[in-house]
């Protein structure tokens, strides 16, 4: 199996604070990889650094085996798209105008709307089911539709790799599933490599082929969710006690945290018994 | 009918997507601009009917009218039109670059720098009897240099691993205030008539424009207006924010510098010949956004026409309403602009 992205000795810091320390990470091609970890562990920072939005302190990120620092930003943009956390569209910009921007790395001063551009934009609108809404201003859409519009823009970019920083934040449960289903389909049907940061551990287990748990400036564990997610991992990575059981619908790991709350289990048993 | 029309020429070497509604609005605005231009040319001490004006413009008018129009009125109206277009486009660029609808040439201190330079010019090149030691024809150059120096100063002070829009605005406001203080100081310490001369310039007026001004301003402005239109594409990307723009392969910092230089060139050119005509750079792009939306390919030409119309109207009112008194055009742009600005603030408060 080949890797879409690799990091070699990658160290990232914010000012004096070291966030990621000498990390060697392989992200497999054609799979969905999800970064998990506690708040402030550096998972978003790592994603941003892979996407060249943040310059590393040292080390390198390799895209198809080539260091991104050696590639032009336009070349990178043809291979890898990034959707940052909660982006904002200018007032009045329509869905079509936004999605069209995804074609930027493929265009030039003269060639601003080729047949290829038109085709890819239409495909992106179709995949995200936004054809009907394409002339509506982005700021007039609901949270889920808006996120779909941004994803459509990254799809129009027509890259093998798509990076997303918490694409489901601020969305209700229905729309979280909708967005993740869309990404899952893109991976299944078009074989695109998806790398994202997610907060919901259970959804991460359901959709990811490959989980990367980050702790103490490095990778704590990496692999298939069913192999790596355990009580001890959750305890160590998130500092939380839990039981790990099986998702009754999907068979993927399901993490149930301990803590306080209304414990009605005994009463329910008593009532039924 | 689709909202857009594809243009693909030379076997796909050239292609662009055109917004039908925006093109229609643009054409209407060009016509309005032409009408305002004609009416303005015909108004003044000597009234000339629009038909005669058109005749004169095509070189077939009566002698007397031709003399009045070509030697007195045309230069100032052309300057008004071009200055309005330049300020509007510069404002549109700054608003897109800084991602804030309240950005304008005044906020970044560029106009303030030109004002300080003008007052400084009047103060430095005066002899003991307070008469100028060099030709007044150098004044535009001083204004232009003032605008340019401040733009560079703001840019380099805002630099910190690249320039972020918010730093640019904050440093700009700081420098702008500093320039105002400097201007006031120079005005207060000089003789009173010099202060009054400077004040008219600061308010902004196209009074006294001549063909020599037109010959310098028009080519300069046209070149940078065209460059601005070419840069519309990078503005569209920059307006999505640094992260998204970088992800799309945009050279954010390099292009941000170029955009700032284009707007400085446009602002510098107009303050040099018309002084600090305010609020056009704020209002025109705003109105354009209402009319044609956020895509800069449509927004910039539309704001250019609106800006040109605004300044021509302000000048027309300024020189006819209180005739024989001349009221600087800047008074009227501020008169419309200030309430508009308050309205904008009021609207964003509710948003």
Image: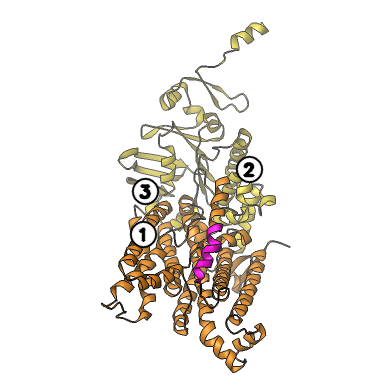
Q: Write down the region rendered in magenta.
A: B327-340
Secondary structure found at label 1:
helix
Q: Position of residue B314 (x, y in %)?
A: 55, 70
Q: Position of residue B275 (x, y in %)?
A: 44, 71
Query: B328 or A55: which is nearer to us?
Result: B328
The hue of chain A in the figure is: yellow
Secondary structure found at label 3:
loop
The residue where tag 1 is placed is B154
Secondary structure found at label 2:
loop
The quarter of the picture where the C terminus of chain A appears is: top right
- Are the residues flagged by discs 2 and 1 in contact, CB closer than 8 Å? no
- Most extreme residue toward the bottom, as rendered? B63
Q: Is residue A157 visible?
A: no
Residue shown at the point (37%, 73%) measured from the top left? B193
Task: Examine the image and state in which quarter residue B308 appears.
Answer: bottom right
Q: Position of residue B91 (x, y in %)?
A: 49, 63
Q: CA distance from mark 2 to mark 1?
A: 39 Å
Left or right? Give the position of B312 relative to B118.
Answer: right
The residue where tag 3 is placed is A55
Dominant secondary structure, magenta: helix
What letter labels the chain drawn in orange?
A: B
Residue shown at the point (62%, 61%) measured from the top left? B292
Q: Is residue A125 above or below residue B277?
A: above
Query: B131 or B39: which is nearer to us?
Result: B131
Q: Mark 2 or mark 3: which is in front? A: 2
> Is residue A168 in the magenta section?
no
Task: Examine the image and state in which quarter residue A135 appears.
Answer: bottom right
Q: Which mark is residue A142?
A: 2
Which is more N-terminal, label 3 or label 2? Answer: 3
> Is residue B336 in the magenta section?
yes
């Amino acid at each position: 199996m080949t890797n879409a992205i690799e990091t070699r000795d990658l160290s990232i810091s914010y000012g004096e604070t070291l966030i990621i320390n000498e990390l060697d990470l392989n992200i497999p091609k054609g799979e969905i990889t999800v970064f998990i970890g506690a708040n402030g562990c550096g998972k978003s920072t790592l994603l941003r650094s892979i996407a060249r939005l943040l310059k590393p302190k040292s080390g390198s990120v390799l895209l198809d085996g080539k260091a991104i620092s050696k590639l032009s930003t336009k070349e990178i943009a043809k291979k890898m798209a990034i959707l940052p956390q909660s982006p904002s569209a200018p007032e009045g910009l329509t869905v079509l105008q936004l999605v069209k921007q995804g074609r930027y790395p493929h265009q030039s001063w003269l060639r601003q709307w080729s047949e290829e551009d038109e085709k890819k934009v239409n495909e992106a609108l179709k995949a995200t089911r936004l054809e009907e809404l394409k002339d509506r201003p982005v700021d007039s859409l609901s949270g889920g539709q808006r996120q779909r519009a941004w994803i459509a823009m990254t799809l129009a970019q027509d890259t093998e790799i798509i990076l997303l920083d918490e694409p489901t934040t601020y969305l209700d449960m229905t729309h979280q599933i909708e967005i993740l289903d869309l990404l899952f389909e893109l991976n299944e049907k078009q074989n695109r490599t998806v790398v994202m940061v997610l907060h919901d551990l259970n959804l991460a287990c359901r959709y990811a082929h490959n989980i990367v748990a980050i702790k103490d400036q490095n990778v704590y564990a990496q692999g298939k969710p069913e192999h790596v997610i355990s009580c001890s991992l959750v305890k160590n990575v998130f500092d939380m006690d839990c039981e790990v059981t099986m998702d009754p619908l999907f068979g993927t790991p399901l993490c149930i945290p301990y803590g306080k709350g209304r414990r009605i289990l005994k009463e329910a048993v008593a009532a039924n018994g | 009918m689709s909202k857009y029309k594809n243009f693909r020429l030379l076997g796909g070497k050239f292609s662009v997507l055109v917004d039908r509604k925006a093109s229609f609005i643009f054409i209407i605005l060009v016509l309005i601009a032409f009408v305002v231009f004609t009416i303005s040319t015909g108004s003044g001490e000597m009234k000339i009917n629009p038909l005669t004006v058109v005749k004169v413009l095509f070189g077939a008018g009566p002698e007397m009218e031709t003399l009045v129009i070509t030697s007195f009125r045309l230069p100032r109206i052309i300057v008004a039109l071009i200055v309005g277009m330049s300020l509007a486009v510069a404002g549109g660029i700054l608003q897109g670059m800084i991602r804030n609808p309240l950005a304008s040439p005044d906020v970044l201190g560029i106009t303030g720098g030109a004002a300080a330079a003008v007052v400084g010019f009047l103060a430095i090149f005066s002899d003991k009897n307070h008469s100028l030691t060099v030709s007044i024809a150098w004044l535009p150059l001083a204004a232009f240099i003032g605008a340019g120096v401040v733009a560079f100063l703001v840019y380099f002070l805002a630099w910190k691993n690249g320039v972020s829009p918010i730093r640019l605005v904050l440093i700009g406001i700081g420098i702008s205030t500093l320039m105002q203080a400097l201007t006031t100081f120079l005005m207060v310490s000089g003789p009173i008539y010099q202060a009054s001369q400077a004040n008219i310039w600061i308010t902004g007026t196209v009074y006294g424009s001549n063909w020599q001004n037109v010959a310098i301003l028009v080519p300069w402005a046209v070149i940078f207006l065209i460059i601005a239109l070419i840069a519309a594409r990078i503005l569209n990307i920059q307006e999505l924010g640094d992260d998204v723009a970088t992800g799309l392969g945009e050279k954010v910092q390099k292009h941000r510098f170029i955009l700032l230089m284009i707007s400085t060139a446009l602002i510098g050119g107009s303050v040099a010949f018309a002084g600090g005509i305010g609020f056009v750079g704020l209002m025109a792009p705003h109105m354009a956004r209402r009319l044609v939306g956020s895509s800069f390919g449509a927004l910039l030409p539309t704001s250019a026409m609106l800006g040109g119309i605004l300044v021509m109207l302000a000048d027309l009112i300024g020189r006819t309403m209180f005739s024989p008194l001349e009221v600087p055009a800047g008074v009227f742009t501020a008169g419309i602009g200030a309430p508009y600005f308050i309205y904008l603030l009021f609207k964003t408060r509710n948003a």
